[in-house]
C-alpha cells in the first residue's frame, strides 16, 4: 500500500526517499533518472515525492553531497594521524576505499560521470586538495623527499597512482568480468587481494632502497661487467 500525505513530514519517509534516490541515481545517473523511478523505488506515489522534495535537481543535490561526504568519510582521520607512518597511511587509505567500494561498487562510476558533467559543485563543496596539502601525510611525504627516501617529489602523482589503482578496477568491473568470465565472488576476492598488493606497488614506486642495498647492487654490477669483459674480451664497457 502506498503512503498517503499528512500535514507533517515524516523523517522516516524522507529518509526512505533519499535512500531510493541514492540507489536510482547511482545506477542511472542524473540524466537517466525520472522522479517516478525514485517514487517507485521508495514505494510511494509521485505526489508524495513532490511533497517532500520539490524537484529532481534538489533531490540530486542532496544525494550528491551526501555521496561525496560518504566517499571521503574517514580519510581525513587517516591523513592526519600523527601516530602512523607514511607507509601505514597508504595502507589504510587503500583498505578504507576498497572496503567502501566493495559495499558500493556503483559509487565511483556515478561520481566520476556526474562530476565530469558538472564539476563546479564538487570543487565548491569538497576541499579535498586543500585538506590533503595541509595534512600530516603531506608533511611526512615532504620530509621523505627531503631525506632522499622518495623518488617522486610531487605528491599529486602518488595520489593519482593510488586513486587509479584503487578505483579503476571497480569502474572496469563489468568489462573485466565479462571478458574473463569471473563471477562476483571471485572478483571480490581479487579486490581483497589488492588491499595488500596496492600498498606494495606504491611503496616499490616511491621508496628508494637504502644505501647499503645500493652498494651491494653496484658491486654486483661492477663484478658482472668485469666478468663479461674478460669472457668476451669487450674493452669498451665502463662503469
Image: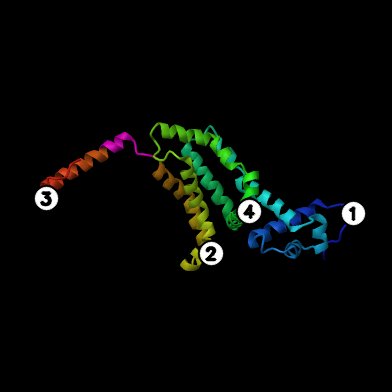
- Residue 82: x and y in percent read 54, 32
Q: Residue furthest right?
A: 7
Per the rendering, the mark at residue 232 is 3
Q: Which residue is mark 1?
A: 7
- Upstream in the sequence, badge 4 or badge 3? 4
- Residue 24: x and y in percent read 68, 61
Viewport quadrant of the N terminus = bottom right
Dot 3 surroundings within 10 Å: few (below 14), some, or many (20 or more)?
Answer: few
Q: Which residue is mark 2?
A: 174
Classify residue 129 as left or right of residue 203.
right
Q: Nearer the viewer, mark 4 or mark 1?
A: 4
Separation of marks 3 and 2 at Cα, in angstroms: 54 Å
Q: Residue at x 44, y 50 (%)?
A: 197
Q: Which residue is mark 4?
A: 118
Dot 4 surroundings within 10 Å: few (below 14), some, or many (20 or more)?
Answer: few
- Residue 179: x and y in percent read 47, 68
Q: Contact, CB < 8 Å: mark 1 with mark 2?
A: no
Classify residue 86 as left or right of residue 124.
left
Q: Does dot 1 land on a helix, a strand or a loop? A: loop
- Upstream in the sequence, badge 4 or badge 2? 4
Amino acid at each position: 500500500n502506498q503512503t498517503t500525505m499528512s500535514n507533517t513530514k515524516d523523517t522516516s519517509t524522507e529518509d526512505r526517499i533519499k535512500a531510493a534516490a541514492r540507489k536510482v541515481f547511482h545506477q542511472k545517473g542524473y540524466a537517466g533518472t525520472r522522479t517516478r523511478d525514485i517514487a517507485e523505488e521508495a514505494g510511494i506515489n509521485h505526489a508524495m515525492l513532490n511533497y517532500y522534495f520539490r524537484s529532481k535537481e534538489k533531490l540530486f543535490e542532496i544525494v550528491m553531497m551526501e555521496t561525496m561526504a560518504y566517499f571521503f568519510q574517514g580519510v581525513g582521520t587517516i591523513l592526519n594521524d600523527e601516530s602512523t607512518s607514511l607507509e601505514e597511511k597508504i595502507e589504510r587509505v587503500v583498505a578504507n576505499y576498497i572496503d567502501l567500494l566493495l559495499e558500493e561498487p556503483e559509487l565511483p562510476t556515478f561520481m566520476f560521470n556526474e562530476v565530469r558533467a558538472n564539476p563546479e559543485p564538487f570543487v565548491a563543496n569538497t576541499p579535498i586538495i586543500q585538506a590533503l596539502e595541509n595534512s600530516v601525510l603531506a608533511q611526512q611525504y615532504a620530509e621523505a623527499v627531503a631525506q632522499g627516501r622518495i623518488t617522486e617529489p610531487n605528491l599529486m602523482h602518488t595520489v593519482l597512482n593510488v586513486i587509479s589503482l584503487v578505483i579503476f578496477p571497480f569502474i572496469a568491473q563489468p568489462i573485466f568480468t565479462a571478458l574473463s568470465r569471473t563471477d562476483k565472488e571471485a572478483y571480490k576476492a581479487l579486490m581483497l587481494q589488492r588491499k595488500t598488493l596496492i600498498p606494495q606497488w606504491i611503496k616499490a614506486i616511491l621508496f628508494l632502497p637504502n644505501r647499503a642495498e645500493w652498494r651491494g647492487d653496484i658491486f654486483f654490477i661492477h663484478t658482472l661487467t668485469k666478468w663479461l669483459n674478460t669472457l668476451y674480451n669487450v674493452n669498451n664497457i665502463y662503469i
